[in-house]
Amino acid sequence: MGSDVDTAPLVGRADTLAMLRSALLDGIAPGHTAAVFLTGEGGVGKTRLLTEVSDGLRDAGALVLTGSCLDIGDASPLHPLRQALRRFDAELTEARTTSAVRGLLQVFDEETPGPDGAGALLERVSRGLHVVAAGRPLVLVLDDLQWVDRSTRQLLLYLLAGLGDLQLSVLAAIRAEALQGAHPLRRVLTELRRLRSVRVVDLAPLDRAGTDELAAAIVGAPLPPDAADQMWQRSGGNPFVVEELARDLRDGHDGLSDTLREVFLARVDALPQHAHAVVHAVAAGVEPVEHWLLAQVVRLPEEELIEAVRAAVAHRLLVGADDGYRLRHRLVAEVLGHELLPAERASLHRRYAEALTSATAELHQARLAHHWRLAGEPGRALPAAMAAAREAERLHGYAEAHRHWSAALQLAAAPAAGPPDADRPAPVEVNRAELLEHAAETAHHCGEHARALTLLEELAEDPAGPTACALHIRRARYLAAAGRSAPAEAEYRRALAVAGCTPRERASAAAHLAELLLHLGRYAEAGDQAREALQLAAAVDGTTSEVVLASAALGYSDAFLEDPDGGLAVMRQALETAERSGRPEDVACAYLHLAELLTGPLNILEEGVVVARRGAERVAELGLGRTWETRLLAIATNGLFRVGQWAEAEKVVAAALRHRPSGADAVELLLARCRLSVGYGDIEASDRDLEAVATVLAGGGARHVLPMLILRAGLAMWQGRHDLARQAVQRGLTESRSDDVIVLATLAWHGLRAEAEAYTSRTVEVDPTAVRRLREVVDRVARKSEKAGAPVRYVADGFLALCDAEISRLDDGRGDPDLWARSATEWDRRNHPYPAAYSRLRQAEALLGRRVRVATAGKLLRQAYQMAQGLGAVPLSSEIRTVAGRARVALEEHPVAARPARPVPRPRTAAPAGASVDELAVLTAREREVLAAVAEGLTNKEIGQRLFISERTIGVHVSHIFDKLQVRTRVQASAIFLRNRPE
């Protein structure tokens, strides 16, 4: 089964191609035979593989004859060989070979009937093929061998047994579902399997990665995650199905194509009657369908049921496993769903529901609700849906719970199927407000923030809904999660102002407000609010969550403002309290604030990254993967960025994005990814992420405004748009209410750098008012940082050193080399390679501008360049090269060909024949050891354990390997290693 447009790439078959070449050509001794029989379901890619192998073997010097069998029985003996010879004859230009081919074709026309004639014919055909081959390896390629005629079967047995004195290889494709019962080819394959040179290979469908790659190649771009998931589920990895679905998606066609529909209907119609019923039943079920359940639905005797299932599996429509039966392609369910009458579908679902009802178990509640609903019994489906939702909540499966609560809302609103009777119990009375409350809360937990707010508005209109204070608190929580911090703060303050608030509600509102103020960088206010919350919580029993929230906010505030050790101890205690309580959001919140404190103000980066990753794993176990895990991974990404492990940071952010976060969770991750993109110089990706962040923050997300504006300023400066950088910084200074001296110092540095760049490049005029305002901010930060905790002051001093050095550039246009030297030293001490490299560049520039210590300037440029190259910082590397070029400073002791600083994927082109270039020559011996372990699929931690070095050191080695090999992923690096390893 081939696609009508054979332009799709061959995906996921590289190993199979290599194996076939070895088995059919490279591994055969002269005078010997070999064969590979490819089996697989229709559309799995057998014909395409035969074509690719044939072309490769021809290029290698083999004589390849290709033919196809026809579904006409034995009416045309030796048809595939005749067809192959005619095709070969039509392509020939050499007279001698043409004569041999036509002589062999004449042998067929003179065939002698009877058993003696058959034996003589086989011998004559063998001799004829020997003449045609003329000493070359001969490969016979046959497609659709399931339809092979008797004479060709005999010929294959004769030749492959070595009776023909001919060096021959056979490659044949067989549609597996056709080999049923007493098919004559099954006996032939049984006989041939006894030969050591014969292999039968079952060609499996593509894996998930191969399916995604093929679909992306046809559509022209990677599929969105939801579309990719659907593609995988519907196709089962069958390349033909993937190609058809991808073309429909690319061309905007809705529904299922007629081609696919007819293909699957034909396969189902070919089944025996009972097997047909089994496939229909599994298609209507929730996979996997257990054997006992299928038996009650189809109502066949056990022996007949087993035979029917066996036939469906043999036809490659079902897959059997220990846990039950599944369709090989979910697409079959779509096709068969349109073939049943509504009454037939309802009857099947009723049978499922009745069978599941007889097997009372909580794990069946979700399926029970599904089948009763499709059977047209909403009254019976509703209690099952509610039970399934509660079970999912108990297991922290919030996405599943939200789906079940949403279904329960629909079922509660559906009209009854009929009046109660003996077979239909009276409908269950439910509280719609309770359903809305559960649906909204689970939507919030699984990251569907907009849906949560919509459901909350419905709940607010319900007379049986929560109190006004409770609604304010919930709305504030959902708004904060959606990234709308300004309206969230207003809602918390409204809750505290409501006269009817209970002590528990007041403590909750105060604790959540303290946490929000902390996120906004208003640490003094957050500390005051946290103390108030703790006082309120102390007077009320059962307020563990409020205590955890308030303690985390208070600890962070104290650590930032006055007592780092005391504040850190409070936060660690909050985490222990949260773990004891076991409430998922408490645990997540405690991990989040502890990781933020360590990677931010306290500058304990390595521990902070470890805490963030450990917390991400923990909250994923608690069902908060799309929300809190995403935010913790964003913190880990930022920490890795600061210590210069950009390649590892990319992997972390990519893993987090697979959760498809929304709201504030998405903003955190987009900002983390944008920080990497700005450093790498990926203008398009940076712009795209910043635009997405701005869209989310349009609803009032003050918490993320400053980080967004800092990144916008940094990007604008690398683009040479110093006016845009100035605007971003001035907007940040105007809108910010934060007392985070580190963020303010970072913003001030970007502003002063923009003005200094404008001054030296003469692109725009320096704005004296902006410079004066920035100097005031620097002075204010310096005063405030003196009162902050020592770790906070330590980090702020690094940025203040940058600010002082930038001001010196504004004073004389060249900058003070001593101030830049001080800045480089400060950032070296903090283990932040990016600002350290930038400071060395400016120090060298200042020395060159004064024409003093030129040798020192050259050394600084080389150091900065090495650091920037190690990071993959393209814009910074480019500016260093520009300065070095002007000063005629050689950046490398031995000049090499220029390469992009940021790793980029290598083109997938084969090396020229005879090439002997060792691509691994650029690596050190230790880096080769690390790369060999990477190629084995080991993690950094596992490699470190093997080589007796730290995981962090392994990360550095991997980053260097990526840079030297000019790759961006472990897969690409592994491919280069495997391509160059010694045999």
Image (spheres, grey):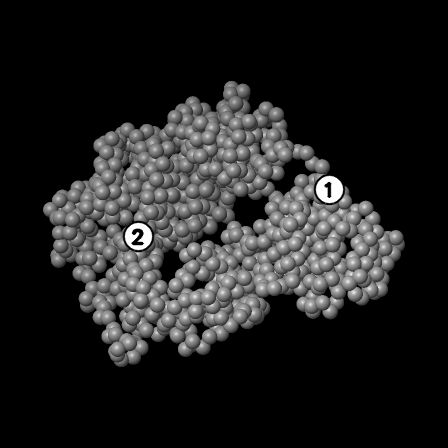
Spatial separation of the CA atoms under disc 1 and disc 2: 62 Å
In the rendering, which numbered label is found on residue 701?
none
Q: Name the residue under label 2.
A: 396
Q: How crowded is mark 1: few (under 14 residues within 10 Å), some or many (20 or more)?
A: few
- Helix, strand or loop at label 2? It is loop
Q: Residue 29 carries which label?
A: 1
Residue 120 against residue 532 in the figure, above or below? below
Residue placed most toward the observer, 826 or 939: 939
Eye-nearest disc, 1 or 2? 1
Q: In this view, does 175 lie to the left or right of 830?
A: right
Q: Where residue 972 sits in the image (x, y, percent)?
A: 55, 41
Rendered location of residue 592, percent (x, y):
31, 42
Crowd class of label 2 (few under 14; some 14 to 19; many from 20; radius 10 Å): many
Q: Residue at the location (30% across, 53% down)?
A: 395
Quadrant location of the C terminus?
A: top right
Residue 376 versus residue 49 in the image, above or below: below
Residue 229 left/right relative to 37:
left
Specify the amino acid type for callout 1. Answer: Ala
Q: Where is residue 288 in the image (x, y as percent from the top left)?
A: 42, 60
Mark 2: amino acid: His
- In the image: residue 83, left or right of residue 957: right
In depth, the one of 187 and 804 nearer the eye is 187
Q: Where is residue 943 in the image (x, y as percent from the top left)?
A: 46, 33
